[in-house]
Amino acid sequence: MFMKRKKISWSLAIVISLLIGGGGIGYAKVTGMCGNCHTMHNSQGGTHMIINTEIDVTSGVYPYLTRGSCVGCHTGTNDGSNPAPYVYNTVGVDYASETLAGGNFKWVVTDDAKGHNVKGIPGMTKDNALSVAPGDLGLAAGCSSTTCHESLYNTTEVATGCEGCHLDPKHHAPQQAAGTSAVKANGYFRFLSGHETGDGSGVEGIEDSDWQFTKGADDHNEYLGKAGSNTFGGFNGTFGIGGNTMTAYCTGCHGNFHTQVDTNSNWIRHPSDAVLPSEGEYSAYTIYDPNVPVARAALNTVSNTVGSTDMVMCLSCHRAHGSPYNDMLRWDYDGMVAGNDSGGGNDGTGCFKCHSEKD
């Protein structure tokens, strides 16, 4: 039974670590009163106990006796004091100052090209142009259903919506040691886990303590990578590179990105989990930029440098949730103009962080 007490503000009531945020505390398990997140009968003095009525209906039924849905608990304005990462905002979002590592779904509601269409986000609809995930490999041959790997807006599958990626959020997992990689016991990095078959069922990484609300060369997430067998990294052309890496996880739905070379072994798609060369135009990227993250061959600590074993990965260019730019890119691709000496504010950013000689 819900114990009588004064109603506690959600913004002060819970310490939680969930989605898509170097060092510091990784996954901090939930602390505080059980009633901050759960309700036995969903009423107190005749008043509903739903946390976010702007998102969730007061008559709704939510799993695990929680006081709302995933989206309801993770909707708000990131201001540095919020105890949970907010991935959706009902009002405007300042991309530079309010966006966490994974971006925000706000932009996707009005433009499919801006991110993942995730069921449960208010106003979100199924993508009008795409029926399956870009780069879909048709994994249905080895699965009981095709749809788990096709869309996060399916209406019939369990693995859809937020849980299409964050399948097993372990809010009560054991405390992760500061600066260490999240593993299965901690719910994996950002609770990104699959259906526990084969390697790569969960993502290993070091999560920033405020999900990159503040960020810098030594204040950011660390991502695991695994270089491919080709000279310049890449995939094996079938499913992916394997391992508990962020890129391997993305290939669960986008397996055909980015694999192809032509008959002369020239890349026709930008490679991912490819080691950055240490010479030529690539040699200029030596100080870590959280706006252009790289993957590490091993996760030991949060590093402020980019070295000879670091790799370009899916998240080097994309936000996992959404961004104000097409294809959920981290920057405006139209602003990447090679050989532009007239300025424009894009020098040393975006594509030019790695391709410095083309700036």
Image (cartoon, rainbow, N blue to C red):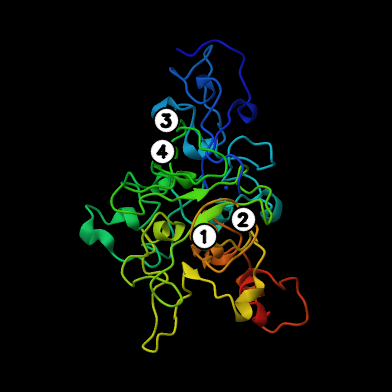
Label 3 with label 4: CB-CB less than 8 Å: no
Q: Position of residue 206 (x, y in %)?
A: 53, 48
Residue 48 visible at all: no
Q: Position of residue 204 (x, y in %)?
A: 45, 50
Farthest residue, direction bottom: 264
- Quadrant containing the N terminus is top left
| Residue at the image point whose x is 43% and y is 51% from the top | 203
Label 2 with label 3: CB-CB less than 8 Å: no
Of marks 3 and 1, which one's residue comes earlier in the chain?
3
Question: Of tags 2 and 4, which is closer to the observer?
Answer: 2
Q: Tag 3's secondary structure?
A: loop
Q: Tag 1's secondary structure?
A: strand
Looking at the image, residue 301 sits to the left or right of residue 40; the answer is: right
Question: Of tags 2 and 3, which is closer to the observer?
Answer: 2
| Amino acid identity at mark 3 | Tyr
Question: Of tags 3 and 1, which is closer to the observer?
Answer: 1
| Amino acid identity at mark 1 | Arg
Of marks 2 and 4, which one's residue comes earlier in the chain?
4
Which residue is tagged 4? 185
Which residue is tagged 3? 62
Of marks 3 and 4, which one's residue comes earlier in the chain?
3
| Amino acid identity at mark 2 | Ser
Which residue is tagged 1? 296
Disc 2/disc 3 C-alpha distance (Å): 40 Å
Which residue is tagged 2? 303
Q: Quadrant of residue 131?
A: bottom left
